[in-house]
Amino acid sequence: MSRSKSRVHLSATQAAVIIVNYMLGAGILTLPRTTVDAVGTPDVWIVIIMSGLIVVGLGLIIVALCRRFPGKTVFEFTPIITGRWVSYILLLPMIVYFITISALEIRVMAEVTGMFLLERTPTWAIVMLFMWIGLYMTSGGLPVIVRVFEIILPITLIIFVLEILLSSQLFEINNLRPLLGEGLMPLLKGLKPTLLSYTGYEVMLVMTAYMKNPGKSNKSVVWGVLTSTVIYLITVVMVIGSLSVNGIMTRTWPTLDLLRSFEIQGLIFERFESLLLVIWIMQIFSTSAIAHYTASIGVRDMFRLKGLRVSMYIFLPLIYILAMIPKDVDQTLAFGDMLGNASVVLFGTLPLLLLITSIIRKKGGKQA
């Protein structure tokens, strides 16, 4: 697998597809509960919109930084800005972050699969199975990953939106009232828990280097994040409107519980949660795979290796160990909260600091 990027030319649409596939992972299954726990009012849907707009801004900062160094990933141009030794301090946590995200997604996938589809199947068996399938896909390189994502995403969105809208028979508009009954302060408390669900925009630190026209990376970020925001918004509104704020607080997987709470007689499928799980497992798998691939690119570019296969195989046991550290669902979700906090530092502040430093030190060329 050559280091040359000349064979890979992502369009703006393909870059947006990668962002959406990265974002729509395990977070959507728990998003209503985590945000309701933090906000405590039915105004969670406002937090989703606010978070989406904030993430669009953060994504635009990232692409503005990357476009100063056309054809280079963050792991290649950071040493130019800060010097090689300082760059190691900044970039190694990024690689650890991507690997940990990959491990977390696989563990959540194993928990959900074991609970709803493959009861009494050992967690380690499910984790290892998806790890090796992910390695098989990512070893084909970015063109294979993008083709798979372009197949998975439309199917996922269509089935998910249809299933959520079918739950409208349980929807009560009064569950979303009163509007801003406790003011704005609860909304600010809800911004932080949504960060993990919006994890994904940072992939542009790498993918911008592979784009055919980096000048359109702004559109990729905007469309990618806004598409995910719309899906999150529909989900949160329907779940809260159907289960109520108090009902959500006692559920680990409120989105799945909503789909299990109704059935439609006379259709081929009378119960829909199994169909959603099969589709959504593919979506979580996508998030894990692209995170693993991005971390492998980081090691290759930082240490100037000739290919990705070595780092991909080296990361496999590390992903397995990290995925098996949590002892139960609660620890797995706490693990996700920790990653959300880490993302604030790594991708909320570091790209801006690098952008400012590159401008001050006159590193990098004009915007691509």
Image: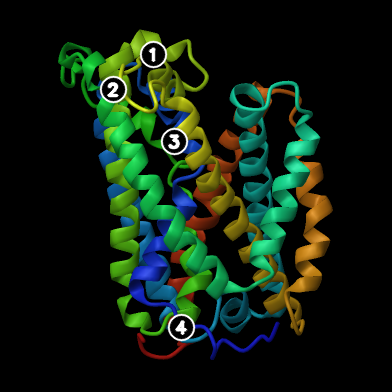
Residue 29 visible in image = yes
Compared across the picture, whether 154 is left or right of 207 comes to left
- Point out the tag, 4 or 1, that comes first from the N-terminus: 4
State which mark lies toward you, 1 or 3: 1
Q: Nearer the viewer, residue 237 or 365?
A: 237
- Point out the tag, 2 or 3, that comes first from the N-terminus: 3
The 10 Å Cα crowd at callout 2, few under 14, some 14 to 19, many 20 or more, is many
Compared across the picture, whether 171 is left or right of 319 comes to left
State which mark lies toward you, 4 or 1: 1
Q: Residue at x 45, y 41 (%)?
A: 197
Res. 261 mark: 1
Amino acid of disc 3: Ile
- Point out the tag, 3 or 4, that comes first from the N-terminus: 4
Q: Mark 4 falls on what kind of element?
A: loop
Q: Residue at x 54, y 91 (%)?
A: 6
Amino acid of disc 2: Ser
The residues bearing labels 4 and 1 have C-alpha atoms spaced at a distance of 45 Å
Mark 1 and 2 residues: CB-CB less than 8 Å, in contact? Answer: yes
The residues bearing labels 2 and 3 have C-alpha atoms spaced at a distance of 16 Å
The residues bearing labels 1 and 3 have C-alpha atoms spaced at a distance of 18 Å
Relative image position of residue 248 (x, y in whole percent) = 40, 15
Relative image position of residue 114 (x, y in whole percent) = 67, 27
The residues bearing labels 3 and 4 have C-alpha atoms spaced at a distance of 30 Å
Amino acid of disc 1: Ser
Relative image position of residue 70 (x, y in whole percent) = 46, 86
Residue 348 visible in image = no
- Point out the tag, 1 or 3, that comes first from the N-terminus: 3
Residue topped by disc 3: 28
Q: In the rendered view, tell whether residue 202 sits above or below residue 63.
A: above
Amino acid of disc 4: His
Res. 131 mark: none
Res. 9 mark: 4
